[in-house]
Image: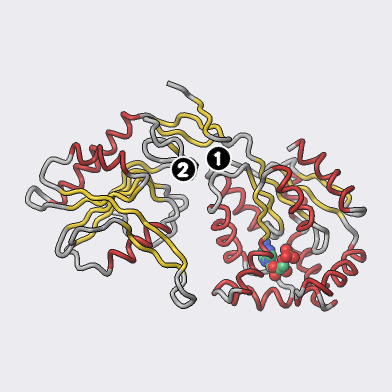
Amino acid sequence: MKQTIKIHDKFFNRYFGAEKIQKAIDSLVQQVHDDLGDDEIPIFIGILNGSFMFVADFIRVYPTNCEVTFVKLASYEGTESTGQVNELVGLTEDLTNRTVVILEDIIDTGNTLSKIYDIFEHLPIKQLKLATLFFKPDVFKKALPIDYIGISIPDRFIIGYGLDYDGLGRNLKSIYQLKTENIKNIVLFGPPGAGKGTQASILKEKYDLIHISTGDIFRKNIKNNTELGILAKSFMDDGDLVPDSVTIEMLKDEVNKHRTTAGFIFDGFPRTILQAEALDAFLAEKGEQINGMVALEVPEDELVSRILERGKTSGRPDDQNESKIRNRFNEYKTKTEVLKEYYEKQDKYYGVNGLGSIDDITCELIKVFDKL
Ligand code: AMP
């Protein structure tokens, strides 16, 4: 049996095999059957595509009468007033007064699960239970009940036994984990106006990384008038930092949207020690780390004139008023600058001169990125 396999562009290490999976399924079946008893005829509903192997092996050992069906969760954009619409495709059975047991292959953030609950809540069923083969406790954030859990795993991307990476890997008998040693996670650091956004846009292409700018995410939320945007706006307009708890949760959500990336360029995050510590802990759960903090070093006077110049076209309220800009520097000096020391202590700080042409600075950054 192969210990390492390649699928598309990624490498995966063998994590565990069919025996451990079957043991977990046997235990799930026993718990479900103990709860439902011999007389209840449940209808098991597998959520496609990932659950097909799990459901087959589960049903094979279920000791009394049961029915089985499969559904697929489809999401599409509705009208402006309905927003995102979720629909179960393939459900033709009448579930009135039935005991429904949903069988999920894996639950991580719980986003899919909450959509499923939303739908089943409105059906006239007798009772709803949920069993999942794999569960990632570190990322699950919803206050929703999961009745039966097979195997809890750390927050690493897995494939095999029905689970895929971009369509492939479902046929593997064992579970494989994404190899994370080659992942580059870089904090692009520097005061406001240092050129982080400009450089990140160039470097993300070169290294195939995901660029996360917390400032951009906040601005997008403000534009779309979301709850997060409304909350962030008052802080941002004055040049203050948005509270840590809000920013950290938002960052985690954004990272979790990209499960198989080659890494991230963090731009504008972390900005406080608490954020840096949260980021370290969050990446450690995934078996990853920050490879380096790469800082653009630019004197403050140069920055103020750069930002005022940018303010003429950026449309950002916090770019257009010198006292707000000065406040952003004040926030930087009192809360953010200490992060240099935080990463120096870990031997991860790399300073780059941020004065010069965009191309020259990119060249300097590439020299550092190549080493990380
Ligand atoms: P930026 O686009 O990075 O200059 O960020 C603009 C503004 O967004 C900042 O002045 C803060 O109000 C807010 N912001 C962005 N990132 C963070 C963060 N990591 N922590 C707190 N506030 C942030």
Residue at 76%, 50% (x, y): give it.
202
Of the residues under marks 1 and 2, which one precedes in the sequence? 2
**In the image, is 259 to the left or to the right of 310?**
left
Q: How is the image coloured?
A: secondary structure
Answer with left or right where residue 132 lies relative to residue 123: right
The structure residue drawn at horizontal position 12% and vertical position 52%, both measured from the top left corner, is 41
The secondary structure type at the circle numbered 1 is loop
Residue under the point 80% across and 40% down: 368
Question: What amino acid is labelled 1 in the image?
Answer: Gly
> Mark 1 = which residue?
287
The CB of the residue at mark 1 lies under 8 Å from ligand 1: no
For label 2, count other residues whose C-alpha is less than 10 Å away and answer few (under 14), some (14-19) or many (20+): some
Q: Amino acid at mark 2?
A: Pro
Q: CA distance from mark 1 to mark 2?
A: 9 Å
Where is residue 337 shown, x and y percent of the image? 78, 58
Q: Quadrant of ligand 1?
A: bottom right
Label 2 within 8 A of ligand 1 by Cβ: no
Q: Is residue 218 left or right of residue 41?
A: right
Q: Residue 332: percent from the left, percent from the top? A: 77, 64
Q: Residue furthest top?
A: 1
Asked whether 47 or 329 is in front, the reply is: 47
**Residue identified by numbered label 2:** 154
What residue is drawn where x is 13% and y is 40%?
63
Q: Quadrant of residue 309?
A: bottom right
- Residue 170 in the image: above or below residue 362: above
- Residue 79 location, x and y as percent? 46, 74
- Left/right of residue 292 with respect to residue 244 in the rendered view: right
> Considering the image in quadrants, where does the C terminus appear?
top right
Q: Is residue 115 above or below residue 282?
A: below
Label 2 element class: loop
Q: Nearer the viewer, residue 307 or 281?
A: 307
